[in-house]
Image (tube, helix red, strand yellow):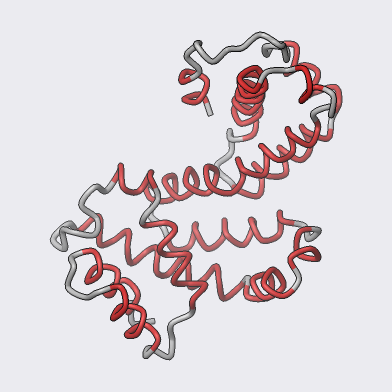
Amino acid sequence: MKHSLITFFLLLSMGSISKAAYSKELFNFPETNPDIEKCIEDIITSRMVIKEYPELLSNQKDDNGYELLLQTDKYCSCQVTRLQGEYELKKNNEIAWSFRDKSIGLGIMDQCALKHYSQSNLNLMYDIMISTKIRRSLEGKLNGRMVAGIRHFASTSSIQNTNLCLQAKIMQKCTKIKSLRSTYTCIQEVTSSGTQMLDFEKNCPTYSTHSLEDEDLSNLGDMI
């Protein structure tokens, strides 16, 4: 791959080309894959990357930043190429895709990341994927476990408080190994185990009608 996407991201960030021209020029590159393009964009514009590399798209003399761009280019090409069937299924039949075993795809993402990222960037990539993909899945599982009646009597802030606590404890248990597949599998096992969830719930606030809007929940947010 000629890293055309990386070049255009740099040009776009510096204002050298307009977004319209950017889209047009990318279209003229036969090797450009929109899924690879989105993969790269999602990573390099993520909050964590911006915090770690604040001048990533503005300082071409930053060797570490440029290395991350090249590694991300290779990673996304690897991921999308090996998971092309999953991408197509999601586009054509999202319901069928939703029932697929996600651990297989996450295992491939682990392999691509191990192959193409340096150790420091590998840890950063893991944190990004945990934040953008796996935690969202965990939030859905916790909401799905909630008894319907709870939503009618518990305050919104109480639900948020309890779920943030549960997320923090589950993630603490399941992120000991830096592997997306292992983390996802651990979360599946924990949320399917009534015994383990009861243990976590005993150590978290219970749902209540009391409004917690005036309380500071930021410390719980930092835990996850």
Residue 31 in the image: x percent, y percent? Answer: 43, 86
Residue 44 in the image: x percent, y percent? Answer: 36, 57
Which residue is at 69% across, 68% downward? 90
The quarter of the image holding the N terminus is bottom left
Asked if 137 appears above or below 158 in the picture, the reply is below
Which residue is at 81% across, 58% downward? 99
Residue 162 in the image: x percent, y percent? Answer: 66, 19
Instruction: Report how many numbered discs are placed on residues in the image.
Output: 0
Pick the residue in front: 63 or 48. Answer: 48
- Of all residues, the one furthest to the top in this rendering is 210
Query: Is residue 82 left or right of 53 when viewed as pictured?
Result: right
Asked if 140 appears above or below 163 in the picture, the reply is below
Query: Is residue 185 left or right of 41 when viewed as pictured?
Result: right
Pick the residue in front: 61 or 213. Answer: 213
Which of the 4 image quadrants contains residue 147? top right
Which of the 4 image quadrants contains residue 94? bottom right
Residue 95 in the image: x percent, y percent? Answer: 79, 63
Asked if 126 appears above or below 106 in the picture, the reply is above
Which residue is at 55% across, 44% downward? 130
Which residue is at 17% across, 73% downward? 16
